[in-house]
Amino acid sequence: MPKRSSKKKRPRDPNQLAKAIVDEATGEAQEAAEETPPADEGKNPAAVALGRLGGKKGGKARAAKLTKEQRSEIARKAARSRWGRSR
Protein backbone atom coordinates (compact mmCIF):
# COMPACT_ATOMS: atom_id res chain seq x y z
CA MET A 1 0.00 0.00 0.00
CA PRO A 2 1.54 3.34 -0.99
CA LYS A 3 2.11 6.02 1.57
CA ARG A 4 -0.08 9.09 1.45
CA SER A 5 2.84 11.38 0.77
CA SER A 6 3.56 9.55 -2.47
CA LYS A 7 0.02 10.10 -3.71
CA LYS A 8 -0.03 12.52 -6.63
CA LYS A 9 -2.00 15.71 -5.89
CA ARG A 10 -4.49 16.96 -8.44
CA PRO A 11 -4.91 20.65 -9.26
CA ARG A 12 -7.88 22.49 -7.76
CA ASP A 13 -8.48 24.68 -10.80
CA PRO A 14 -11.15 23.01 -13.00
CA ASN A 15 -9.27 23.74 -16.24
CA GLN A 16 -5.98 22.35 -14.93
CA LEU A 17 -7.83 19.35 -13.47
CA ALA A 18 -9.45 18.64 -16.85
CA LYS A 19 -6.05 18.78 -18.57
CA ALA A 20 -4.55 16.46 -15.94
CA ILE A 21 -7.37 13.95 -16.46
CA VAL A 22 -6.93 14.04 -20.24
CA ASP A 23 -3.17 13.64 -19.86
CA GLU A 24 -3.69 10.60 -17.62
CA ALA A 25 -6.17 9.08 -20.04
CA THR A 26 -3.90 9.53 -23.06
CA GLY A 27 -0.72 8.47 -21.27
CA GLU A 28 0.96 11.85 -21.57
CA ALA A 29 1.02 12.22 -17.78
CA GLN A 30 3.46 9.30 -17.54
CA GLU A 31 5.92 11.02 -19.86
CA ALA A 32 5.69 14.28 -17.90
CA ALA A 33 6.29 12.46 -14.62
CA GLU A 34 9.49 10.91 -15.97
CA GLU A 35 10.86 14.32 -16.95
CA THR A 36 10.58 15.82 -13.46
CA PRO A 37 13.56 15.25 -11.14
CA PRO A 38 13.05 13.19 -7.96
CA ALA A 39 11.92 15.14 -4.89
CA ASP A 40 14.79 14.04 -2.63
CA GLU A 41 17.54 15.03 -5.07
CA GLY A 42 19.04 17.48 -2.57
CA LYS A 43 19.22 14.94 0.25
CA ASN A 44 22.29 12.96 1.19
CA PRO A 45 21.55 9.34 0.14
CA ALA A 46 23.67 7.93 2.96
CA ALA A 47 21.72 9.92 5.55
CA VAL A 48 18.40 8.86 4.01
CA ALA A 49 19.44 5.20 4.13
CA LEU A 50 20.62 5.50 7.74
CA GLY A 51 17.41 7.16 8.88
CA ARG A 52 15.29 4.57 7.14
CA LEU A 53 17.37 1.77 8.61
CA GLY A 54 16.86 3.06 12.13
CA GLY A 55 13.14 3.51 11.56
CA LYS A 56 12.76 -0.01 10.24
CA LYS A 57 14.37 -1.70 13.24
CA GLY A 58 13.19 0.70 15.97
CA GLY A 59 9.81 -0.87 16.77
CA LYS A 60 11.07 -4.45 16.71
CA ALA A 61 14.06 -3.62 18.89
CA ARG A 62 11.89 -1.82 21.42
CA ALA A 63 9.35 -4.68 21.55
CA ALA A 64 12.13 -7.21 22.10
CA LYS A 65 13.56 -5.15 24.95
CA LEU A 66 10.28 -4.72 26.88
CA THR A 67 8.99 -7.26 29.37
CA LYS A 68 5.43 -8.55 29.23
CA GLU A 69 4.48 -6.37 32.21
CA GLN A 70 5.93 -3.24 30.56
CA ARG A 71 4.04 -3.91 27.32
CA SER A 72 0.86 -4.48 29.30
CA GLU A 73 1.28 -1.20 31.20
CA ILE A 74 1.89 0.72 27.97
CA ALA A 75 -1.26 -0.80 26.46
CA ARG A 76 -3.27 -0.02 29.61
CA LYS A 77 -2.08 3.60 29.58
CA ALA A 78 -2.96 3.94 25.88
CA ALA A 79 -6.45 2.51 26.46
CA ARG A 80 -7.03 4.90 29.38
CA SER A 81 -5.94 7.82 27.25
CA ARG A 82 -8.13 6.73 24.34
CA TRP A 83 -11.26 6.21 26.39
CA GLY A 84 -10.66 9.28 28.55
CA ARG A 85 -10.74 11.63 25.56
CA SER A 86 -13.97 10.26 24.08
CA ARG A 87 -16.13 11.21 27.08
Image (spheres, rainbow, N blue to C red):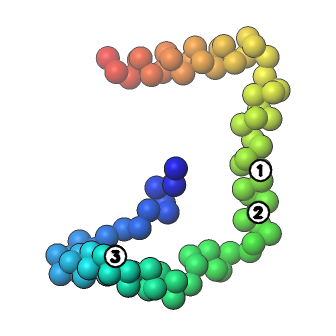
Judge the density around disc 1: few (<14), some (14-19), many (≥20) Cα neighbours within 10 Å: few
Can the viewer see residue 17?
yes
In the rendered image, residue 62, in percent from the top left (x then y), is placed at: 77, 32
Which class describes the residues within 10 Å of circle 3: few (<14), some (14-19), or many (20+)?
Answer: few
Residue 9 in the image: state x and y as whole percent.
36, 68
Q: Amino acid at mark 3?
A: Glu
For mark 3, what is the residue? Answer: 24
> The residue tagged with tag 1: helix, strand or loop?
helix
Query: Which residue is found at the position 65% from the left and 14% from the top?
Result: 73
Mark positioned earlier in the residue sequence (2 or 1): 2
Outermost residue to the left: 14
Check the image and name the residue furthest to the top: 69
Give the secondary structure at mark 2: helix
Q: Quadrant of residue 10?
A: bottom left
Give above or below for 35 relative to 63: below
* Residues at marks 3 and 1, CA–CA distance in whole angstroms: 37 Å
Per the model, the C-alpha gap separating discs 2 and 1 is 9 Å
In this orientation, does residue 20 appear?
Answer: no
Indicate which label's residue lies in the foreground, 3 or 1. 3
Image position of 68 (left or right of 7): right
Name the residue tied to disc 2. 49
Q: Amino acid at mark 1?
A: Gly
Question: Which of marks 1 and 3 precedes in the sequence?
Answer: 3
In the depicted structure, whether residue 77 falls above or below residue 34: above
Residue 45 point in image, percent of width and height:
75, 72
Q: In the rendered view, tell whether residue 46 sits above or below residue 57.
A: below
- Give the residue number, with chain letter if any, for mark 1: 54
Identify which residue, 1 or 4, lies in the foreground: 1
Mark 2: amino acid: Ala
Q: Nearer the viewer, residue 63 or 78?
A: 63
Residue at image position (41%, 67%) is 8
What number of labels is visible? 3
